[in-house]
Image (cartoon, rainbow, N blue to C red):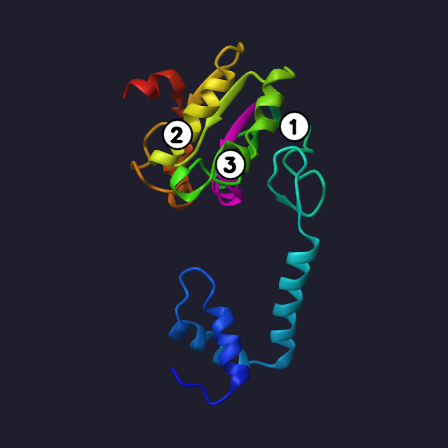
Amino acid sequence: MDFPSKLLENAVNEMAQLPGIGKRTALRLVLHLLRQPIEQTTSLTTALDLLRNEIKYCKSCYAISDTNLCEICEKPSRDHSIICVVEDVRDVMALENTQLYKGIYHVLGGKISPIDGVGPNQLNILPLIEKVKNGGVTEIIFALSSTMEGDTTNFYIYKQIKDYEIITSTIARGIAVGDELQYADEVTLGRSLIHRVPFESSLKV
């Protein structure tokens, strides 16, 4: 693709690095931004700059937050004895949209995937195990997507905490095997939470 401007080419190349964005789509987006009032483009770049430099991760659950402790973790009305284990903040948002879950979360930041070089030490697994060891946790709900990597991660965590007197459950498989949690509708996701099953039972399926 030949560009009439090096500045345009650089902008398109940067935009094309975003997931799901090819060169043609990147060009269309950049040209759209170029046609907008400069204030709008400045607002976008300022928002991205603030996001990159000022975003925090909750010191308790590791979800994205504006403060050191996220809004969910700091609410005394939430049941802090029940922890729902998810892959990333998109899953937290999806589950919160159901308005049915009243516990707290633990964001792993990914799934165990040896083929991608992601092991347990690259994820927020150890802090979760420490929470269980320190007491006060009555149930761990595994809400990772039902893929090989998700099941591997669930089983790894389960092995670390199975000797402690807590309930381990997994969301019901109302969600198709292989589907990502974030793409499930609220009704299906809500029912999966309500009808969660003991994790040991899911190992036999």
Q: Residue at x 34, y 34 (%)?
A: 148
The part of the chain drawn in magenta is 82-94
Decide which of 158, 201 is in the foreground and name it: 158
Using the rendered view, name the quadrant where residue 184 is placed: top left
Does the stretch in magenta take in 158?
A: no
Disc 3 is placed on an element classified as: loop
Pointer 1 local density, CA inside 10 Å: few below 14, some 14–19, many at least 20: few
- Looking at the image, the residue that sits furthest to the bottom is 4
Could you tell me residue 116's position as x and y percent?
A: 42, 44
The mark that comes first in sequence, 3 or 1, is 1
Task: Inspect the image, locate mark 3, and give the three-letter code of the amino acid beneath it.
Answer: Gln
183 versus 32 height, above or below? above
* Nearest to viewer (mark 2 / mark 1): 2
Could you tell me residue 79's position as x and y percent?
A: 60, 24
Task: Inspect the image, locate mark 1, and give the three-letter code of the amino acid beneath it.
Answer: Ser
Could you tell me residue 132's position as x and y percent?
A: 59, 19
Disc 2 is placed on an element classified as: helix
* Nearest to viewer (mark 3 / mark 2): 2
Could you tell me residue 97's position as x and y percent?
A: 49, 41
Q: Residue at x 31, y 39 (%)?
A: 178
Decide which of 98, 159 is in the foreground and name it: 159
Q: Does 196 sit left or right of 30 as displayed? A: left
Using the rendered image of the protein, determine whether residue 146 is visible from the camera's viewpoint. Answer: no
Q: Which residue is mark 1?
A: 77
**Do tag 2 and tag 1 residues touch (Cβ < 8 Å)?**
no
Q: Which residue is mark 2?
A: 152
> Which mark identifies residue 99?
3
Q: CA distance from mark 3 to mark 1?
A: 14 Å
Q: CA distance from mark 3 to mark 2?
A: 28 Å
Task: Inspect the image, locate mark 2, and give the three-letter code of the amino acid beneath it.
Answer: Thr
Pointer 2 local density, CA inside 10 Å: few below 14, some 14–19, many at least 20: some
